[in-house]
């Protein structure tokens, strides 16, 4: 048994030595192969770009008018609003309207007690009848060549009749003015009128508002005056009606600058047919002003050196060249510049800071300027 164990031990040692020798030979053979034929798990090198080129992304230039956004806060005012006052003292006899009721031009609003005016009116009418009869009688006698009537008497009768007519007109006016009427179509504001109330001369009776058109007045800096003109469109929002946007237009502006705040006052007009906008509301006003077309590029494309701002343009041969730019407007991620750039030119966007004069570049992506930043 001992002999058999020794034989098996020799066989096992021989197998192990043989396996080690075979593996060593394979290892030497693999190391002697070219690198491209080795069977290791290393990844093959990426040869999609030249190893000495800088990989960048580029954007196509768009030549468009810049949109300068002017923003301000304004207050709404009714296009027509009047506080009707009494130019006489009197007692309210009748009220023809209620608060928030609509009235048309000339509609009666309040009637004051007018018995005295009624008496004076009737007296004036009676005087007219008297003077007309006297004039007609004298005129007839004069036409009949009656010696009892002279031309001067007829003239005096004619003058008396004219005076009576004037007194009648005055009495009619005093009678009519005791009825306060609407000077324009609109809505009656809240009031405390009651029948029998005594209204002193000069006191407010009611307020009449026509808010079918609203004026929104706001101010802009003096530096933006050249961008404001009559007829320009504005967008209006108010915290009272979240989510709604109203369109208006500029109808007037001050011809002088506020010396304290260095601003100019602007008036915009907005239609309000449903009367959802109330006078006195606060508005956010936005005014977008179109200007002459300029090259538009991403703001990240602009680099700076001691000579100023510049961008890298990719020429037709695929090489970068430096182009000086002057920034004119900015909106979101875009800038409008004055530069020797044309529609469709390619400027480097990502990776521009890695480029130097004479460098070789490879374009990864070429895309148009993103227009989503206009807002």
Image (tube, helix red, strand yellow):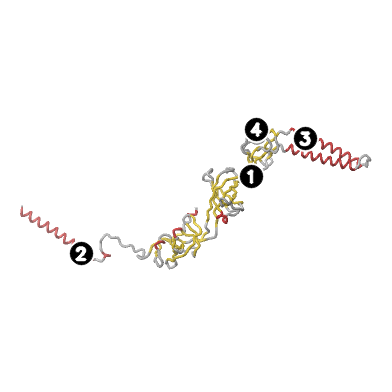
Q: What residue does disc 3 label?
A: 120
N-terminal label among 4 and 2: 2
The picture places residue 43, in percent across and down from the top left corner, at: 30, 60
N-terminal label among 3 and 1: 1
Mark 4 lies on a secondary structure that is loop
Which numbered marker is on residue 194?
4
Q: What residue does disc 1 label?
A: 80
The picture places residue 330, in percent across and down from the top left corner, at: 49, 56
N-terminal label among 2 and 1: 2
Q: What residue does disc 2 label?
A: 28
347 lies left or right of 91: left
322 lies left or right of 18: right
The structure residue drawn at horizontal position 36% and vertical position 65%, both measured from the top left corner, is 52
Would you call the spot at circle 3 few (<14 residues within 10 Å), some (14-19), or many (20 or more)?
some
Above or below, comparing residue 18 to residue 134 in the picture? below
The structure residue drawn at horizontal position 70% and vertical position 39%, both measured from the top left corner, is 87
Would you call the spot at circle 2 few (<14 residues within 10 Å), some (14-19), or many (20 or more)?
few
What's the distance in space between the residues labelled 4 and 3, CA to CA?
A: 27 Å
Mark 1 lies on a secondary structure that is strand
What's the distance in space between the residues labelled 2 and 3, CA to CA?
A: 137 Å
């Amino acid at each position: 048994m001992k002999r058999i164990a020794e034989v098996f031990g020799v066989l096992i040692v021989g197998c192990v030595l043989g396996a080690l020798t075979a593996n060593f030979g394979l290892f030497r053979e693999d190391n002697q192969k070219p690198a491209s034929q080795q069977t290791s798990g290393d990844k093959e090198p990426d040869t999609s770009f030249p190893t000495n080129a800088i990989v960048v992304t580029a954007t196509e230039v768009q030549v468009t008018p810049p949109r300068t956004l002017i923003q301000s806060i304004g207050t709404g005012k009714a296009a027509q609003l009047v506080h009707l006052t009494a130019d006489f003292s009197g007692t309210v006899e009748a009220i023809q309207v209620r608060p928030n009721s609509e009235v048309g031009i000339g509609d009666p609003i309040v009637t004051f007690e007018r018995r005295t005016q009624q008496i004076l009116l009737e007296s004036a009418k009676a005087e007219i009848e008297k003077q007309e009869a006297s004039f007609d009688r004298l005129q007839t006698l004069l036409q009949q060549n009656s010696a009892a009537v002279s031309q001067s008497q007829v003239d005096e009768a004619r003058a008396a009749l004219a005076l009576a007519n004037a007194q009648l007109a005055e009495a009619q006016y005093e009678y009519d003015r005791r009825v306060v009427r609407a000077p324009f179509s609109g809505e009656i504001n809240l009031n405390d009128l009651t029948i029998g109330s005594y209204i002193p001369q000069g006191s407010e009776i009611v307020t009449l508002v026509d808010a079918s058109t609203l004026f929104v007045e706001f101010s802009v800096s003096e530096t933006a005056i050249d961008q404001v003109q009559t007829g320009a469109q504005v967008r209006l929002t108010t915290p009272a009606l979240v989510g709604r946007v109203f369109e208006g237009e500029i109808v007037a502006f001050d011809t002088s600058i506020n010396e304290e705040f260095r601003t100019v006052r602007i008036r915009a007009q907005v239609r309000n047919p449903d009367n959802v906008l109330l006078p006195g509301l606060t508005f956010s006003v936005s005014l977008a002003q179109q200007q002459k077309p300029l090259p538009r590029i991403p703001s990240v494309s602009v680099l700076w050196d001691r000579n100023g701002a510049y961008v890298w343009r990719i020429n037709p041969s695929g090489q970068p060249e430096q182009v000086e730019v002057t920034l004119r407007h900015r909106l979101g991620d875009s800038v409008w510049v004055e530069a020797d750039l044309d529609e469709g030119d390619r400027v480097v966007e990502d990776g521009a800071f890695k480029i130097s004069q004479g460098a070789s570049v490879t374009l990864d992506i070429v895309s148009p300027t993103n227009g989503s930043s206009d807002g």
